[in-house]
Amino acid sequence: MNDEEKTKASLHKPSLGGASFVPGMFSFNGMILSEALKNRRDEVQALQAVDFVSWAIFRKYEYGDEFYYNIVKGKIIEENPLFA
């Protein structure tokens, strides 16, 4: 089961004030769900990139390991140690 299927499975079917799902709205809801999942994937990828960069900087200062930092250092505009 891929991520999109897992997300779809975890969502509740839409309801209208306790009424059951209205036939004919499935294509619209499917489109909305598809767009939401697409946007969510983009956000997750951006969050993973930010997490990697912060982890690389952390490794540099905490352990003296600059391997991953060297991969991203060309993209860092300004870097100031917090406690110098």
Image (cartoon, helix red, strand yellow):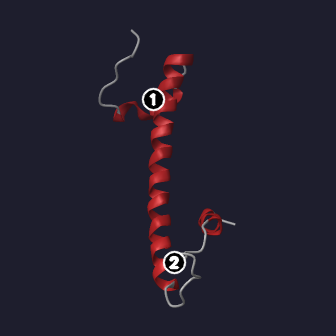
What residue sits right under mark 2 in the picture? 16
Residue 15, horizontal then vertical, whole percent: 55, 76
- Outermost residue on the top side: it is 84
Quarter where residue 19 is shown: bottom right
What residue sits right under mark 1 in the picture? 70
Which quadrant, please, contains the C terminus? top left
Taking the spot 45% from the left edge, 73% from the top edge, the residue there is: 32
Q: Is residue 1 above or below residue 77?
A: below
- Along the viewing direction, whichever of 74 and 6 lies nearer the viewer: 6
Taking the spot 57% from the left edge, 17% from the top edge, the residue there is: 63
User: What's the amino acid at mark 1?
Assistant: Asn
- Along the viewing direction, whichever of 15 and 64 lies nearer the viewer: 15
Q: Is residue 9 above or below residue 21?
A: above
Identify the element where label 2 is drawn: loop
Which quadrant, please, contains the N terminus? bottom right
Distance from Cα at disc 1 to Cα at disc 2: 53 Å
- Outermost residue on the left side: it is 77
User: What's the amino acid at mark 2?
Assistant: Leu
Taking the spot 50% from the left edge, 24% from the top edge, the residue there is: 58
Residue 37, horizontal then vertical, whole percent: 50, 65
Identify the element where label 1 is drawn: helix
